[in-house]
Image: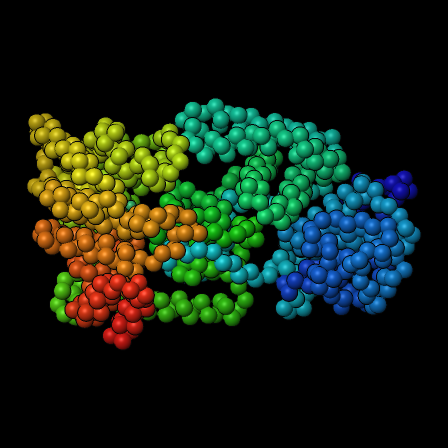
């Protein structure tokens, strides 16, 4: 077979010439099928392209009836071609008609062909079409021929991906690579983002897949693999970086793959079939992806990410191209798409150009989510294969409210969203008009609306929203986005900036709430069975008093000459509060002794987020100057439902008797003791929930920046006394059958409240 017509190498060389010819797309395809048929001594060679409607259209053929080109269309669930597309795997048959899925298409006249070899046209593991050769005689296709056809399919994949074939398509029947995709995920940060895909870690585009010199390509591949192994070993040896739990596991997995013989072997084989080193990496990775994407085993899918990463590193090694997009190259309306991202990486982008964030992973309370919310970037998480389906520069819509992503949206969807954006803008303008209005209910009760914050980027929100102050400053965020422990001077600088930005308005700093899911990349992670119930927050602070002391010192110094408010997270027993407060007193004494300026007054409070504190309210209120309910954690612990586990996080409604009774207990104990009570969990950021809290007696709420407007708009129209009349009897009902949310909602709507 090879002798007469030159074999696979000659085919690839000729292909490269055809690719370089200045001819139309159809002519190029026609030449390619003629070339393949001649080279493989096949009577038939055809190209089928997968269309947006998930059917396969015949785009070119040598041997079948040419009139059938662009007319023959098959579903993916019919025929052998459909089989190859669906399974994303090659199929070689010497008696095609005996295959149960053989389907006869009279217009193509293919009944006389017995042998069939079909290979999927793959890119990034996604099927773009099918390439087929057929022979009249019954024959067995060799491994070498199958390889050669797969390599040719890669060239076609690039042709399809480049958009070159789109001009040949009828409207509405374009190649599937451009097809609109509607993806569902989990809402992470509210907002709508319309823009263009920026892949956070883009796949390196391989344009040159056919080798000039096989020996040279083999050497290049070997050298790149050697460098990759070396780099991974070096990372593993780097003490500072790699000791922290998961990071090290990932690197270990990389090391294992980088030394995996099967992987190496497949890539070397691909180079020997005539591909460039980068072509070989891409081809093996695409095959692996196609196979693994069909696996339902989560472990395998996780490994797929690792392999993707590794293949990309190898490509970077081979092409010498760096990662990510240059800052200047970022488009005006960028939508970042990534598997996952650290908060620091998100902050590295030019905020002014980012409109949205799409993550394959990411939970509602993960750190990058908190940062996205702070930046006001619409974000959706848990979007399966988002980075695999999106291409750099694709138009995309992120709906952070519904948790949906529209990739390459059709015109009508785009129109509908443009209208939504205009509507939101009008509403935002209405909220902005409320900025200076005091937050007073219809029946004259002041309900202060504070901000939740944690980063410098949050500070402009104080003025923009007209918030009464910062009700929760999450100091751990500064630690989480840093690569080493922030020094006292750095902490001091941030706290001063926060107090300066707030001016006369109060700021409540929460001391470090790390541990649990809030991991510091530079601090050795402690393996714990149940991290949420483990060594975290004030527990860690008291066991490592040096850390807490230095933070308290920075806070006290930043607050010199003003009022300072500090609170401790996760207090479970009043003794913990006593110890923590003693640290504040000791630091005050220390600073006084050394002649530093001191705050005019220091208010020390506790967060109520562990249920045990609900049963020590009188004791804690006798000691603390104020309390703040951390409903995110309190609800998680009350219901024993992990807030970051999507399966259970929303299983229990906080607008039901158990949680509301707990919130009421705190509010009532606060009034008994004459101490201020705030609620700073995400709950307060939702208007209907804010109505319930006002009815329970809360006169201060701390919410996310984007929620100040909507919550204030609702509260301004609220008659708290009327809401109490509706809510309190429901709380005292002991039948267990009342639907508090529905009843409260009906009340709100009947009262004309905007929800
Ligand atoms: C809470 O638990 O409600 C809270 C505000 O703290 P965090 O979300 O930071 O745990
Ligand atoms: Mg908490």
Query: Measured from the top left, where is residue 283 in percent x and y?
Result: 67, 42
Give the vertical position of 25 relative to 425 (above or below). Answer: above
The quarter in which the N terminus is drawn is: top right
Give the residue drawn at x 38%, y 38%.
530
Quadrant in which residue 686 is drawn: bottom left
Query: Measured from the top left, where is residue 311 in percent x and y?
Result: 59, 38
Give the vertical position of 257 relative to 723 (above or below). Answer: above
The quarter in which the C terminus is drawn is: bottom left
Query: Measured from the top left, where is residue 378 in percent x and y?
Result: 40, 56
Give the residue drawn at x 80%, y 58%.
100
Classify residue 126 as left or right of residue 4.
left
The answer to whether one can see residue 729 in this image is yes
Query: Measured from the top left, where is residue 169 in percent x and y?
Result: 68, 65
Give the vertical position of 361 relative to 492 (above or below). Answer: below
The answer to whether one can see residue 195 in this image is no
Classify residue 710 as left or right of residue 445.
right
Give the residue drawn at x 43%, y 62%.
402
Classify residue 101 as left or right of residue 109.
left
Coloration of the structure image: rainbow
Give the residue drawn at x 25%, y 29%.
543
Q: How many marks?
A: 0
- In the image, 724 versus 14, the foreground residue is 724
Give the vertical position of 623 relative to 133 (above or below). Answer: above
- In the image, 564 versus 354, the foreground residue is 564
């Amino acid at each position: 077979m090879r002798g007469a017509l030159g074999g696979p190498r000659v085919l690839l060389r000729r292909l490269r010439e055809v690719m370089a010819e200045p001819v139309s797309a159809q002519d190029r395809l026609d030449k390619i099928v003629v070339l393949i048929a001649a080279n493989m001594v096949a009577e038939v060679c055809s190209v089928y392209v997968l269309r947006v409607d998930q059917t396969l259209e015949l785009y070119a053929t040598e041997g079948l009836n040419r009139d059938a080109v662009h007319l023959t269309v098959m579903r993916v669930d019919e025929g052998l071609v459909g089989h190859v597309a669906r399974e994303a795997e090659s199929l070689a048959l010497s008696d095609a008609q005996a295959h149960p899925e053989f389907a006869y298409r009279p217009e193509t006249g293919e009944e006389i062909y017995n042998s069939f070899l079909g290979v999927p046209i793959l890119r990034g593991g996604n099927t773009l079409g099918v390439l087929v050769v057929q022979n009249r005689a019954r024959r067995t296709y060799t491994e070498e021929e199958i390889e050669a056809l797969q390599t040719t399919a890669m060239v076609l994949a690039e042709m399809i991906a480049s958009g070159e074939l789109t001009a040949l398509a009828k409207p509405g029947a374009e190649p599937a690579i451009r097809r609109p995709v509607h993806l569902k995920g989990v809402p992470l940060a509210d907002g709508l983002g319309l823009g263009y895909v920026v892949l956070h870690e883009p796949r390196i585009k391989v344009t040159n897949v056919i080798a000039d010199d096989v020996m040279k390509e083999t050497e290049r591949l070997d050298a790149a693999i050697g460098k990759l192994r070396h780099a991974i070993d070096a990372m593993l040896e780097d003490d500072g970086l790699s000791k922290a739990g998961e990071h090290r596991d990932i690197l270990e997995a990389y090391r294992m793959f980088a030394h995996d013989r099967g992987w190496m072997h497949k890539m070397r084989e691909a180079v020997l079939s005539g591909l460039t080193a980068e072509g070989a990496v891409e081809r093996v990775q695409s095959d692996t992806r196609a196979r693994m994407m069909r696996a339902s085993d989560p472990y395998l899918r996780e490994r797929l990410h690792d392999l993707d990463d590794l293949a990309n590193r190898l490509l970077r090694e081979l092409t010498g191209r760096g990662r990510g997009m240059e800052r200047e190259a970022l488009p005006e309306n960028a939508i970042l798409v990534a598997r996952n991202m650290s908060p620091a990486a998100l902050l590295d982008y030019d905020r002014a150009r980012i409109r949205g964030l799409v993550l394959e992973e990411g939970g509602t309370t993960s750190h990058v989510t908190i940062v996205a919310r702070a930046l006001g970037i619409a974000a959706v998480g848990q979007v399966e294969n988002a980075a695999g389906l999106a291409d750099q520069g694709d138009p995309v819509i992120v709906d952070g409210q519904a948790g949906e992503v529209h990739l390459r949206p059709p015109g009508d969807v785009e129109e509908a969203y443009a209208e939504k954006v205009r509507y939101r803008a009008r509403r935002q303008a209405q909220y902005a008009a409320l900025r200076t209005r005091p937050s007073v209910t219809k029946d004259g009760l002041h309900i202060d609306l504070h901000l939740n914050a944690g980063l410098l980027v949050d500070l402009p929100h104080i003025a923009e929203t007209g918030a009464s102050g910062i009700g929760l400053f999450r100091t751990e965020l500064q630690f989480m986005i840093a690569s080493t422990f922030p020094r006292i001077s750095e902490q001091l600088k941030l706290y001063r900036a926060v107090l300066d930005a707030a001016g006369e308005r109060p700021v409540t700093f929460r001391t470090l709430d790390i541990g649990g899911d809030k991991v510091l990349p530079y601090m050795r992670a402690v393996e714990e069975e149940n991290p949420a119930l483990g060594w975290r927050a004030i527990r860690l602070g008291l066991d490592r008093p040096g850390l807490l002391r230095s933070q308290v010192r920075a806070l006290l110094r930043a607050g010199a000459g003003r009022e300072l408010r500090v609170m401790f997270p996760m207090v479970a027993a009043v003794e913990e509060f006593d110890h923590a407060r003693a640290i504040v007193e000791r630091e005050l004494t220390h600073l006084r002794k050394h002649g530093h300026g001191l705050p005019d007054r220091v208010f020390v409070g506790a967060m109520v987020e562990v249920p045990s504190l609900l049963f020590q309210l009188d004791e804690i209120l006798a000691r603390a100057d104020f309390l703040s309910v951390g409903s995110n954690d309190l609800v998680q612990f009350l219901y024993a439902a992990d807030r970051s586990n999507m399966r259970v996080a929303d299983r229990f409604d906080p607008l039901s008797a158990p949680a509301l009774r707990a919130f009421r207990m705190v509010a009532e104990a606060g009034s008994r003791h004459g101490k201020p009570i705030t609620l700073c969990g995400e709950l307060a950021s939702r208007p209907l929930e804010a109505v319930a809290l006002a009815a329970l007696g809360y006169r201060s709420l701390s919410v996310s920046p984007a929620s100040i407007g909507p919550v204030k708009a609702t509260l301004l129209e609220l008659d708290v006394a009327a809401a109490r009349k509706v809510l309190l009897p429901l709380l005292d009902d002991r039948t267990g059958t009342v639907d508090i949310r529905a009843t409260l909602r009906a009340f709100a709507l009947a009262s004309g409240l905007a929800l």
